[in-house]
Amino acid sequence: MSVSGKHWAIDGGVLAAIERLVPEGGTVLELGSGDGTAALVERYTVFSVEDEGTWVGHCEGATYIHAPFTSPEGNLPRWYDVEVLRQRLPETYDLLLIDGPAGHKGRDGILHHLDLFRTDVPILVDDTVRSHEADIARELAMRLNRPMHVFWNFSLIPVEPLTAEDVARIQWQAVRVLEKKDEAYVRRYFTTSEPAREIDRLEWHQKVAELRERKKSKKEGGVSLRIGRIITFPGRLLMKAVRKR
Ligand SMILES: C[S@@+](CC[C@H](N)C(=O)[O-])C[C@H]1O[C@@H](n2cnc3c(N)ncnc32)[C@H](O)[C@@H]1O
């Protein structure tokens, strides 16, 4: 999701990341609902936490958890109603997507309520192109003792390290999204819209093909080596026996 009018929903980069981490039929817990929830519902069981009544039930097929935006006592930041979350959050899910509440309301409440969530699943923090969300992701990675992958507008904290092919595939889709952004949008978040190297999604498409090829030949190399060892086994056995005499 991003911030200007038509950029609210999760984009192709975020979807690619989720697809690398969660097999079809898995479960996604989403904080913040919207049009993008529909894309998730096509592949996954989706629990969607939403604070705004108008967005609750927006997408058919998702299970909504209406947790209004509240002011807690003390110095804690405003966030979802914690009591509702405590009672309604599902016990199991395969990925946590942090994309709500709306950016201007602040999302750092999660840092005070990590106990409500599973910490043994990958976490995707959307909109880390903004400092507030980037800080949340960084703190989550530190507190969970996990490395973090930073793409241009979202960050991913996986449980198992991603493979080079996973990273290349996600970057390919993330760059595809970036290529379509207009200059004014890019300049809102970065010093300049002038890239230091050409921004070309095809570079990452080729990288994916290269990495797949490398994996395939490694596998085939391993199989040929094993076949070779089987074929030469009787000969090696005979040689061993002769040497012993
Ligand atoms: C970033 S949006 C969540 C987007 C959602 N994950 C998706 O992929 O569509 C965060 C919050 O903004 C509100 N929202 C969602 N879509 C919106 C839209 N198109 N315009 C204005 N507000 C929206 C909802 O209250 C939502 O919880």
Image: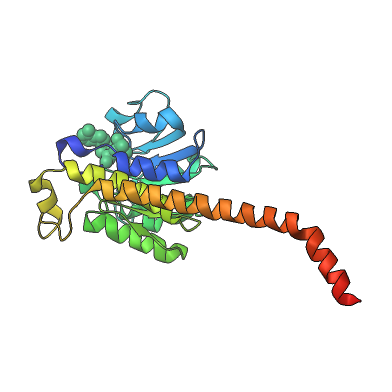
Outermost residue, top direction?
60
Residue 87 percent coordinates (x, y): 49, 40
Which residue in the rendered view is the most extreme toward the right? 245
Decide if residue 245 is on the left or right side of residue 9. right
Residue 139 visible to an observer of this rendering: yes
Q: Residue at x 28, y 55 (%)?
A: 133
**Residue at image location 50% in from the left, 44% down from the top:** 94
Q: Position of residue 184 (x, y in %)?
A: 7, 47
Q: Is residue 232 left or right of residue 241?
A: left
Which residue lies at the image location 36% right of the left edge and 40% below the top edge? 15
Residue 6 in the image: above or below residue 175: above
Say whether residue 6 is left or right of residue 172.
left
Answer with the quarter of the image where residue 221 lies: bottom right
Query: Observer-nearest residue: 52 or 15?
Result: 15
Towards the viewer: 29 or 241: 241
209 or 133, nearer to the observer: 209
Q: Can the viewer see residue 81?
A: no
Q: Is residue 199 left or right of residue 56?
A: left
The quadrant of the picture occupied by the N terminus is top left
At 53% from the left and 55% from the top, the residue drawn is 218
Q: Residue 20: x and y, percent?
A: 44, 44
